[in-house]
Image (cartoon, rainbow, N blue to C red):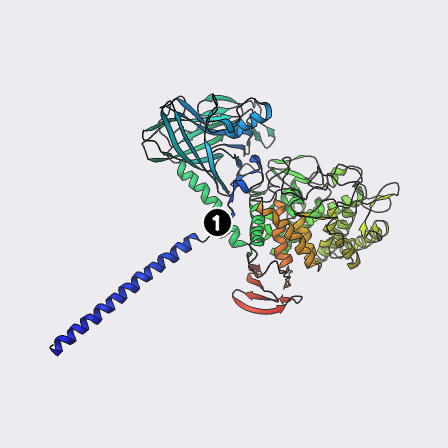
Amino acid sequence: MNTMKAKTLLTKKVNDGRKSLVNNALILGLFFLAINQISAQKEITPADPEYYAMDREHITFDDEQVLLVNYRGFVSPRQYSVTQFTNVWFLPIGAPRYEFNLNFFDKGTERLIEDDVPTKWKSWVDDGKSHDPLGSNFRPNSPSIMVTQDEKWQPNNYHRTATFHKEYNKKWVSFSAESWTNVSYDDSEIFIKLTLKNRNSKDLEMTVIPNQIAEIIERYSKKGVVPGSNKAKKIDAFTLGSDMAHVRVSSSIQKTSDKGFEINIAPGNSETYYFAVKFYDPAIGAPAISQTNIQARMERADKKTRDMLSWAYNKLPKLTSTNKKLEAYYYRCILSVLMSRYENPSYISDVFWAVGTWPYTISWDNSYASDLIAMLDPESLKGAIITDFEQVQLKRTYVGWNGAHWDILYIQEPFALQIMIEAYIRHTGDYSIFDEKAAGKTVWEWMQAWVNELQNNYTNNLGLMDVGYNTEKIIEIRTDGYNHAVPITNTLSVDLLYTMSDWAAKRNEKKLKKTYFDDAEKLKDLVDKYMWNEELGWFDNYYPDGTKGTIWTYHLFDLLGTDYLPNHQAYRLVSHLQEGEFLGKFGVYSIARRDKVHWDLIDSDWGGGGQYAGMPGRISRNLYQKGFAGKGWDVLKRNIRYIDHFPYLPQNPRIDAPEQDRSSMPVQIAAGAGMEAIVFGTFGVKIEPNKLTIKPFNHEDIGEATLKNITWKGRTFGVKLTRKTFSVYEDNTLIATEFYGESVIID
């Protein structure tokens, strides 16, 4: 072979090989890039609603406790239906017993296919007037019903699938249904996206019939119920209403009749339709029945939920842990607080922190999540404080969306406000809040007024704080005894007086500083003399006739959050956090099981059988901060077990079973206390004006855990827990690594 030709051939082979390698490398690179992109797309964080998704079958709530909330109002999607929802609240319009679903009239078989199983089932169980849904579709003369298959909740929507597959007189009706339901942020409406697939060999021609049931639909003003009849009646196939408010069903379906929406789906095809169910003042006019922009509005509602979750995720400390249940609990506590936030233009404040689903803001409840709110949105916490002083004025506790109209006062008011103000100052350093005015007085003057109120109107001849006989002023329990001179009112009054003395010093009011300090010392001595029971290691109630009574309420564990409690009293109180006394499967009994006089199985709030949403978190945090880390984790880990059963944390779940009473709210702002227990307890974060202290406590159950995005004075810190040591970072730079028991102080 010619040498030159051989060289040319060899060069060609080498070049071809190189091209092949390059091509292969390129192909491989593109493959891995695609894989990485797919992986990146699938990554879900707590900023995404998908993170919180739960299958309906794992949720122990009943239908009216399953909520879709979007900061303006809420509804409850119903189980065993692909389109039904109930429990509508878009204040100023309320329709708690309103029920909506779509029915389907198949023209080929002239059969009505119904999608209201929950209504039928309830009627059958309650009064025997309807058919047993288990017999539907095959028993003679029974209804034809949609059969649901899968249901999944997440904060931004409720996803359901269903099937219908029946032969009538040799004619088949076979189609699948898939729906997504969500709630508007911009207006008082609910959206449904519905995809139907025709599985038959012939056209599926149906009338989609809106089915609306309601006894009453009401509308309120800031002064109360709007005049007129609230009795609901059918206006046409798409509209239901009372004198006060109407509700209309609109759709992207353009063809309508006097029965509903007309559709036709070719064999094997799928079609997607959008529906909007809008509640409105009839004076403003009804929305169009056929609309082209429902999809855009529904997508905008979805975006609002996503934006809020992302906002909270990026503002608050971020937790990761090898204990995934701890991690999930942390974020579901945050979700519970977010679901209690309203930005409804009808409300008395731009941001209204509701107690939960009840349209009231209550400082006692808010106080359990006040650090969380201060980290997330300090201006809204300040607004909640100002709103309280404007509306409460020493007379009431419940501040409704339209103002305070319910004259019930919890004497816990000043102590809750103290906690909220402390949280606001802790995270902002802004002492000027005391000079803010509400109803003609400054915040500082209102706090002084509260002290005067306690000392002048709630003090007995011994000098102890006495709430009188009315137990509603403190907590609602169904047995007497938790009244008159109650330990927690007196001990928290001591703490309030010490705090007022400190605040007076900050304001350079030396006379007030001394007065409040002396008053605190005097009351503390009285409490120790008349209320501390050394034998029991507990505080007694003191009654007007000089007798005493012992009530084993977990309310007393609030004392662990004060600075003045002597160590020996703290140790004795904590000693009662044991199985058979206060500890149960899911947390802390509100009344200890040992209390044979007051323990109440009916009351799962404060009477014994369960626990108020904020208490396990607060107790855990206080235990950590008092040096009882093991016990703090013991309380917290029990509360974490709820996340297997609840997508968000309810007001007063039971201790021995994951159940929430129907009489109470399925979500509670106070659940934020669980998140605070992890930040300020487990991770030992302590924020002070001039320093940040990190003193975490680990437990083998937690494993490795990291808390990032802790902000202080414009700086950002992180804490990593390992088995034997913890490390503190500023941004991504290591500051220190220490053994547990040591502190890292940043100034």
Instruction: Name the outermost residue toward the left.
Output: 2
Q: At which x and y percent is residue 655?
A: 67, 44
Q: At which x and y percent is residue 34?
A: 35, 56
Q: Quadrant of residue 406?
A: top right
Left or right, 235 with respect to 706, comes to left
The quarter of the image holding the C terminus is bottom right
Q: Residue at x 79, y 58 (%)?
A: 568
Q: At which x and y percent is residue 491?
A: 77, 50
Is 727 or 526 nearer to us in this picture? Answer: 727
Instruction: Name the outermost residue toward the bottom.
Output: 3
Is 83 or 562 nearer to us in this picture? Answer: 83
Q: Quadrant of residue 395?
A: top right
**Amino acid on which disc 1 is placed:** Asp
Question: With respect to residue 449, does 426 lie above or below?
Answer: below
Q: Residue at x 25, y 69 (%)?
A: 18
**Number of residue marks:** 1
For label 1, the residue is 48
Left or right, 171 with respect to 685, comes to left
Label 1, residues with CA under 10 Å away: few <14, some 14-19, many ≥20: many
What element does badge 1 sit on? loop
Left or right, 408 with respect to 345, comes to right
Question: With respect to residue 124, does 572 lie above or below?
Answer: below
Can residue 711 be seen at all in this image of the molecule? yes
The quarter of the image holding the N terminus is bottom left
Can residue 692 be seen at all in this image of the molecule? no
Question: With respect to residue 658, does 251 lie above or below?
Answer: above
Q: At which x and y percent is residue 305?
A: 49, 44
